[in-house]
Image (cartoon, helix red, strand yellow):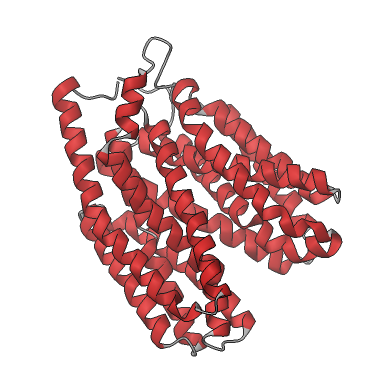
């Protein structure tokens, strides 16, 4: 069946959306110090962004499957754009709460929808490679945003500049054609089909693999600086800089993954990546008092854990082609629960003065991913084969 849209343009739109999600995830971290100086109550804003991300993650899937990609992408970008402008121009606490909630809500939708778009527009051979490049766009957005906030002392300028770029992107989204919605009133899945999907081993195993992946990303991003300063005795600025090396490593890892998956098996490639991440954790544990070793270890860790999301979501998208939005929504929601739970428990550990076990817990999370990933891939393959035998190709 011929397509009435340009795959490359739709892919570019998805990459832009993912870059904006990178901005959303780091938006508060980069501007928090000057914002809190201006509005001391703003210290509590991260909670409202988290709520927005969760709601956006939950709602995007069913809406996207039923109504299509274009207007959801436009509206979610516009919501995030409005949130950025509120943060730039308001010093009123209720408005700041609304602004950061909008950033989280729009970002949560963008994260899930852009992954689902790329999964849907590419075939089995190219899906994993393209999703790894999409993941690298998240890193690009995060790095450019952080760099802009470091180089420009007035935090309002990067907020306004990002809003202008988003506005131009929204115009681009409106101008191009997207694939049509996969579901209509006549082809809407029944309740039993949704139940079968949500309780399937394929979705649950992928989701809990990503649960540990997100827990790893969340705890490493939130507590590495505390570990390096309190346990390793490294200067605070050097410890903070290690997070940049993590992001650079992840970006390079995902670009490399796009090339490696052309010829290699995705699960085998994932094991290699996770092995590199585990080596990085061990290096950090043994050399936590050396600034250069810690920078190198964080680059290895970022490189190594960068493959999990692209590989797992590509597998999941290949199984639930007709309901990819709902499947991604459920899987990413469970993954986010891992991130929040991981941060909560790690906070308790550091509060109790037991931060020395930080790297042991990170290693345990990587081992959990290594154990779960092959079962997740096997379950996806089995489910896909069973669906093809029972109904033929489930993607129209």
Q: Position of residue 286 (x, y in %)?
A: 39, 87
Is 123 left, or right, of 223 in this rendering?
left
The image quarter in which residue 382 lies: top left
Q: Position of residue 35 (x, y in %)?
A: 79, 60
Asked if one can make out residue 251 in the rendered structure from this viewpoint, the answer is no
Q: Residue furthest left?
A: 389
Q: Nearer the viewer, residue 80 or 353?
A: 353
Q: Nearer the viewer, residue 195 or 93?
A: 195
Q: Nearer the viewer, residue 84 or 151?
A: 84
Q: Nearer the viewer, residue 280 or 46?
A: 46
Residue shown at 63% from the left, 35% from the top: 170
Give above or below for 157 relative to 61.
below
Left or right of 384 in this view: 56: right
Q: Residue furthest top?
A: 186
Which quarter shows the C terminus? top left
- Whether residue 50 is visible, yes or no, is yes
- The residue positioned 13% from the left and 25% from the top of the image is 389
Q: Residue at x 48, y 24 (%)?
A: 68
At x 39% / y 60%, what residue is drawn?
Answer: 306
**Is 247 rendered above or below residue 315?**
below
Q: Position of residue 93 (x, y in %)?
A: 82, 49
Assign the N terminus to one quadrant of the image: top left
> In this figure, what is the number of numbered marks?
0
- Residue 118 pos. (x, y %): 40, 39
Task: Please tell me in which quadrant of the rendered image residue 163 appears.
Answer: top right
């Amino acid at each position: 069946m011929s397509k009435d849209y340009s795959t490359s343009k739709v892919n570019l739109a998805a990459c832009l959306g993912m870059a904006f999600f990178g901005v959303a995830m780091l938006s508060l971290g980069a501007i928090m110090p000057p914002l809190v100086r201006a509005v001391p109550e703003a210290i509590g804003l991260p909670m409202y962004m988290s709520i927005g991300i969760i709601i956006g993650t939950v709602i995007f899937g069913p809406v996207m499957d039923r109504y299509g990609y274009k207007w959801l992408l436009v509206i979610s970008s516009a919501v995030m754009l409005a949130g950025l402008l509120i943060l730039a121009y308001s010093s009123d606490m209720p408005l700041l709460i609304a602004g950061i909630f909008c950033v989280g809500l729009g970002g949560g939708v963008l994260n899930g929808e852009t992954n689902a778009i790329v999964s849907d527009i590419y075939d089995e051979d190219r899906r994993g490679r393209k999703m790894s490049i999409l993941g690298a766009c998240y890193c690009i957005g995060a790095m450019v945003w952080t760099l802009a906030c470091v180089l420009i002392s007035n935090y309002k300028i990067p907020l306004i500049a990002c809003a202008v770029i988003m506005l131009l992107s929204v115009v681009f989204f409106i101008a191009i054609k997207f694939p049509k919605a996969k579901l209509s009133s006549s082809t809407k899945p029944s309740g039993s089909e949704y139940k079968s999907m949500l309780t399937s081993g394929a979705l649950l195993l992928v989701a809990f693999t990503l649960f540990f992946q997100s827990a790893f990303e969340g705890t490493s991003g939130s507590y590495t600086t505390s570990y390096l300063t309190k346990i390793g005795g490294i200067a605070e600025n050097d410890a903070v800089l290690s997070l940049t090396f993590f992001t650079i490593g992840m970006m390079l890892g995902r670009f490399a993954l796009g090339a490696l998956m052309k010829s290699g098996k995705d699960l085998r490639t994932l094991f290699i990546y996770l092995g590199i991440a585990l080596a990085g954790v061990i290096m950090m544990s043994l050399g936590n008092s050396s600034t250069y070793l810690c920078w190198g270890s964080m680059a290895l860790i970022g490189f190594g854990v960068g493959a999990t999301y692209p590989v797992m979501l590509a597998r999941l998208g290949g199984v639930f082609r007709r309901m990819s939005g709902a499947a991604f929504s459920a899987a990413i929601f469970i993954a986010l629960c891992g991130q929040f739970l991981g941060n909560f428990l790690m906070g308790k550990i550091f509060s109790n003065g037991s931060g020395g076990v930080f790297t042991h817990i990170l290693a345990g999370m990587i081992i959990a991913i290594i154990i779960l990933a092959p079962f997740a891939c096997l379950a996806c393959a089995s489910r896909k084969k069973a669906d093809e035998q029972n109904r033929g190709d489930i993607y129209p």
